[in-house]
């Protein structure tokens, strides 16, 4: 059971192999949180060999189809990441498809096959490396970004791999410590967060949430939506997220 009143980084994760259908919101030049899971949650991602393959696939796709990696955490059977896409671009699905394809092809060639293929995967020509789908959430404001950054960096602690985020080598936490966002001893919550993220930091990390012609800041520092339809779409996806959280948050 997921407690909706609990901080995001403490919420219980439940993964499903067949995720329910939902409407993906695509904001050109937007910032997105992703969860990508291995097939049958096989713990294959953090070996030295697999990490090298994923790094190369990531770099290949990033060079051909640019995006900024705002934050990332790699765990044995899944990964979380926040991306910012270029202005005029909202095609994150194509990028993930390419990363999965390049990783799977080289993993199979260099490490070996995954689980036995189901008839449906044989028909589609798919390897048993990744779950077919991924979870995406459009970052809609500053607090949403902070909450997902905390969630990503706290995830290894929540899963019992380490006592503190600083002890997990496969995340962007060290970069955020260097930038002065977290204290190295941060272990969840506001204590140990040296400063709250401000918009200057968000720009530095490449995490401005939407296309600037659609969203800006008031003199008081509040978000102003210049296009009402965008605000309506964000409200819609937030309602969808709440209704699907039990199955889809990771």
Image (cartoon, grey):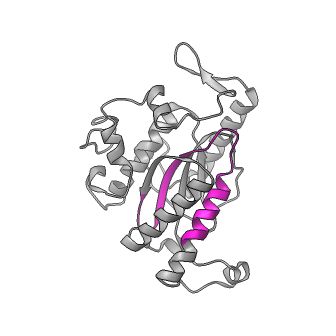
> Is residue 231 visible to us here?
yes
Residue 127 versus residue 171 in the image, above or below:
below
- Residue 90: x and y in percent read 68, 46
Which residue in the rendered view is the most extreme toward the top?
219
Please name the residue shown 47% across and 69% down the image. 53
In this picture, residue 164 sits left or right of residue 121: left
- Residue 111: x and y in percent read 46, 82
- Residue 109: x and y in percent read 53, 82
> Is residue 131 visible to us here?
no
Counting labels gives 0
In this picture, residue 78 sits left or right of residue 135: left
Residue 89 versus residue 134 in the image, above or below:
above
Please name the residue shown 55% across and 34% down the image. 208
- Residue 185: x and y in percent read 23, 43
Which residue in the rendered view is the most extreme toward the right?
229
Q: Nearer the viewer, residue 221 or 12?
A: 221
Within the magenta stretch, is there residue 77? yes
In this picture, residue 234 sits left or right of residue 217: right
In this picture, residue 157 sits left or right of residue 102: left
Question: Splitting the image into 4 quarters, where does residue 239 fall?
Answer: top right
Within the magenta stretch, is there residue 31? no
Please name the residue shown 76% across and 31% down the image. 229
Please name the residue shown 62% across and 56% down the image. 64
Residue 237 versus residue 101 in the image, above or below:
above
Q: Nearer the viewer, residue 136 or 198?
A: 198
In the image, the segment drawn in magenta is 74-103
């Amino acid at each position: 059971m997921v407690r909706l009143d609990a901080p995001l980084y403490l919420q219980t994760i439940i993964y499903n192999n067949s995720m329910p259908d939902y409407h993906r919101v695509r904001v050109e030049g937007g910032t997105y949180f992703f969860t990508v899971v291995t097939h049958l949650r096989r713990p294959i991602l953090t070996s030295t060999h697999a990490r090298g393959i994923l790094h190369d696939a990531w770099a290949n796709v990033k060079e051909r189809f640019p995006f900024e990696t705002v934050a990332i955490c790699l765990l044995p059977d899944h990964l979380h990441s926040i991306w910012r896409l270029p202005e005029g671009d909202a095609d994150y699905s194509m990028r993930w498809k390419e990363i999965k394809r390049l990783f799977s092809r080289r993993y199979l060639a260099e490490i070996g096959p995954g689980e036995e293929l189901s008839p449906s995967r044989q028909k589609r020509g798919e390897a048993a490396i990744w779950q077919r789908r991924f979870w995406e959430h459009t970052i809609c404001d500053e607090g949403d970004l902070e909450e997902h950054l905390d969630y990503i960096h706290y995830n290894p602690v929540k899963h019992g791999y380490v006592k503190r985020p600083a002890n997990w080598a496969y995340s962007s936490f060290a970069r955020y410590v260097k930038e002065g966002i977290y204290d190295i001893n941060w272990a969840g919550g506001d204590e140990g967060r040296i400063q709250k993220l401000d918009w200057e930091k968000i720009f530095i990390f490449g995490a401005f949430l939407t296309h600037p012609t659609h969203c800006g800041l008031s003199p008081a520092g509040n978000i102003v939506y210049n296009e009402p339809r965008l605000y309506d779409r964000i409200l819609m996806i937030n309602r969808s997220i709440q209704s699907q959280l039990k199955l889809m948050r990771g």
